[in-house]
Amino acid sequence: MTTNAQTSQGPKSAKLHARRQEAVPVGPYHVTPLYIQSAQGAIVTDVDGNELIDFAGGIGMQNIGHCHPKVVKAIQEQAAASIHSCFHVMPYESYIELAEKLNEKTPGDFKKKTMFANSGAEAVENAVKIARKATGRSAVVSFERGYHGRTLMTMSLTSKVNPYKHGFGPFAPETYKLPYPYYYRAPQGMLPEELDEQVLHHFEQFFLGEVGADHIAAIIMEPVQGEGGFIVPSTTFVQGVRRICDKYGILMIADEIQTGFARTGKLFAMENYGVAADITTMSKSIAAGMPLSAITGRAELMDAPGAGQLGGTFAGSPVACAAGLAVLDVIEEENLVERAQVIGDRMMNAFRSWQEKYDLIGDVRGLGAMVALELVRDRVTKEPAKEETGKIVTECWNNGLIGLSAGIFGNVLRFLPPLVITDEHLEKGLHILEQAIAKASK
């Protein structure tokens, strides 16, 4: 595969973009003005024939790669047999089989049950409903910089105001936020373990000053903050949250929507911390691009809502469930959990070497193949380099690499390459990225 020296918007993409501006509102943003024609593995081809290496993976949706043959075959066969009867009218085996597999694979040495929805936000909404019904409590706690979706409830749980919340209030009541450790931006001289202790101690103060622990149904957390900038907490912190939940009878919800399905070098990110949540939400890479999400939790919690209280017309369609079953097979057959760690190690090693060369790189962090660079204009003040970050993203796609930005300050480059990416394409992508960083550092 060879990428063009320059992949700026071609005439076909330009024509489509003009039509898009006339027919589609500005709200649904896109990183590049390039319009996709086809994709395979970690390579995307636009309508003008430009080939690009994908380090974004549909924001973590394509862990097993674009159009994996096994998934395509499963979708085609199911679509030919039955597209959708609605599980609430005539159920089907693929829903049950995928639920059985997720019950087995999701962390937790306890009996579990699984239900399906369509999107990550729907998964979180249902997890909150289940937690409230099971506990008889109403409050839900999330974390600063957390991202959980765009619906009213999930937007309320989300921390970043612009663009996700600005002008969309009022928000759902009984949602609260607590600090989440951000080691790179901790007070000067503070050790990570000291920050963990400080943040965990804040819970007790919060219960006294804001809302009683006996009023809180659940604490929801991302095992690695995604939109927040790929902030990786310590095992001490995650286990500390688990202990607080146990102490006060609060349910722990793990939002594994971006971290799940081999991304972090484990099938689920919570395995990295030796912690099992009471309820786990998942989506994105669960079905390689088909609309599907899942809520897996302790059986007694999942059974708390009565018949008809949960569900949705399109939730867990046969086609999406068939894709989900194929995804789990591919992850196992192609050893993608192990491959994620190999990819992550290669990227982290490259990033650390660049950190010694480019002052623009303030921090390097990640877990498995979920890796990021935080860019700053000054390593002492840590002033966010938001403008430079945007320029690097543009420079990358102009040269055949798709990447993403993130972070509360918009100064983090985040990478979620398909785990089937070849070594050749990985190295080519890293070369393009370094060139863009070098240019922005001048």
Image (cartoon, rainbow, N blue to C red):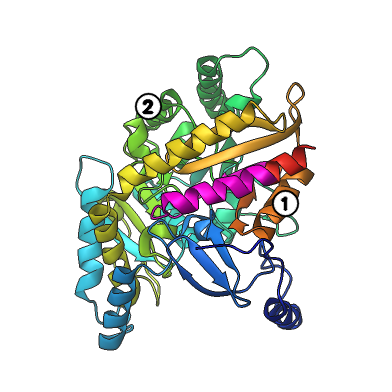
Q: Is residue 243 shown above or below 11?
A: above
Q: Is residue 246 left or right of residue 407?
A: left
Q: Which residues are magenta?
A: 410-435
**Residue plotted at (76% across, 82% down):** 22
**Residue plotted at (60% across, 78% down):** 47
Q: Quadrant of residue 74?
A: bottom left
> In the image, which disc is placed on residue 434?
none
Q: In terms of depth relative to the viewer, which is nearer, 26 or 348?
A: 348
Residue 407 appears in the picture as rendered: no
> In the image, which disc is placed on residue 162?
1
User: Is disc 2 in contact with disc 1, using a CB cutoff of under 8 Å?
Assistant: no
Which amino acid type is marked by label 2? Arg
Residue 413, magenta (yes or no): yes
Badge 2 density bin: few <14, some 14–19, many ≥20, Cα 10 Å:
some
**Residue plotted at (50% across, 47% down):** 427
Q: Is residue 134 shown above or below 25?
A: above
Residue 302, magenta (yes or no): no
Label 2: which residue? 243
Residue 79 appears in the picture as rendered: yes
